[in-house]
Structures are given as C-alpha cells and as structure tokens.
Image (cartoon, grey):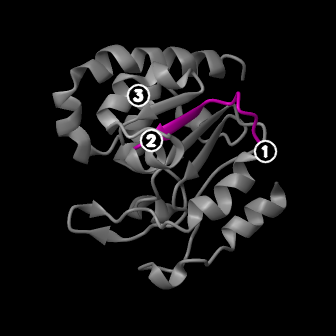
Amino acid sequence: MTSLKQRISECKLCEACLPYPAKPIFQFSSKAKLIIIGQAPGKQAHDSGTPWNDQSGQRLRAWLSISNTLFYNENVVALVPMGFCFPGSGKSGDLPPRKECAPTWHPLLLSFFSNQVPRLLVGSYAQNYYLNDKRSLTERCKNWRDYGENTLPLPHPSPRNNIWIKKNPWFEAEVLPEYQRIVSSILSQC
C-alpha cells in the first residue's frame, strides 16, 4: 500500500490538462472502515493539500455526523476522489474530474478493501462510474436501499446544491438519519 500511495502521489498522467502542477489529494489505509468516493479536490483542497477542506467537506461531515478527527483518520475513513487533482474552474463551478484517474488508480486502490467496507458515492460522477443504473441522482438517493447498506449514494454537499436540497426535503429528513445510523455503527467499532 505504501508503494501505491507513492505512485499516486507522483502521478502526472493528466498534468498537461491541469491549470496547476499535478497534486493528487487523497487519504486511505487498508484499515479504513468507510470509503468516501467523491468528485475531485477543489481549489481550497488543492491549496491546503487536505481533501474535503472546504464548505462541501463541512457539510459532508455534518451530514454523516462525523468529527474532523475521525474523518481525517486514514485508518477510519478512506477519501478517494474520482479525479485526484484539482481540475480547474469552469463557468458554473469546478470542471469535471479528469477521466484518467479512476480507471488507472481505483482498481488498485480498492483491491485493498473487502466488498463489505461501505462506500459512499458522493455526486453523479462517482455514481455514474460505480452504479450500473441509469436513474437520476435524485432517484438513486431516494432509492438508496436498492444498493444495500454497503453502497450509499449521496448528492454532492456543495453549497451549489442548496436548491436541490430545498427541492428534496426527504433527503435530510429520511435518508440522512439512516446514513448517520450506518456510519455511527461503523465508527462505534473504532
């Protein structure tokens, strides 16, 4: 695993397409009890070198009722982006994650984990990649039980999704308490 972390850290596969030098940002250990597969680091995460180091990360931790200490403990939570480097900004937010990362690194990285380690799929990029399901993000989140307790689809916690959250009050009222129960059960073993 140390070798894999080093290889990912040194990756420059798509550097020519990035606005800044490649800086893969991730966190994992084979001991992790929960895998969060997100989009790509934002500019704040790029600048700090810390994944989910922004308002989206604050909301995600609140949604899951998880402390910063546990969230940033690689032996508890693996933070695996679809694109490991900040892809740059577009007209309406960050650009999509680079497509080279997930097929290159995810199979190697996830091979260290059993299928019993729960995976939170944050946002449509992670869900489209991992779920063989043509439903919308809204329908996936609404019907999360269809995937079992080890695959949990989430909308992206970005403030840009405030409208989605307001239009779908069932998510915070019905789905999040279940996710919090699942995460709490996992973390109680730590």
In the rendered image, residue 116 lying in the magenta stretch gets the answer yes
Identify whether 61 is placed above or below 23.
above
**Cα gap from disc 3 to disc 2, whole angstroms:** 12 Å
Q: Which residue is mark 1?
A: 112
Query: Residue, x 49% and y 39% (percent of image)?
Result: 121
Q: Is residue 39 left or right of residue 165?
A: right
**Residue type indicated by callout 3:** Trp
Query: Which residue occupies the foreground of this view, 144 or 28?
Result: 144
Mark 2 neighbour class, 10 Å CA radius: few under 14, some 14 to 19, many 20 or more? many
Looking at the rendered structure, the secondary structure element under dot 3 is helix
Identify whether 180 is placed above or below 15.
above
- The residue segment tinted magenta is 113-123
Query: Which residue occupies the foreground of this view, 99 or 51?
Result: 99
Q: Which residue is mark 2?
A: 122
Q: Earlier in the sequence, mark 3 or mark 2?
A: 3
Mark 3 or mark 1, which is nearer to you? 1
Identify whether 109 is placed above or below 138.
below
Mark 3 or mark 2, which is nearer to you? 2
Q: Main secondary structure of the magenta part?
A: loop
Looking at the rendered structure, the secondary structure element under dot 2 is strand
**Residue type indicated by callout 2:** Val
Rendered image quadrant of residue 30 = top right
Q: Is residue 55 left or right of residue 85?
A: left
Q: Is residue 44 left or right of residue 151?
A: left
In the rendered image, residue 133 lying in the magenta stretch gets the answer no
Query: Residue, x 41% and y 60% (percent of image)?
Result: 42
**Cα gap from disc 3 to disc 1, whole angstroms:** 27 Å
Mark 2 vs 1: CB contact within 8 A: no
Q: Which residue is mark 3?
A: 63
Checking the image for residue 48, the label placed there is none
Q: Quadrant of the C terminus?
A: top right
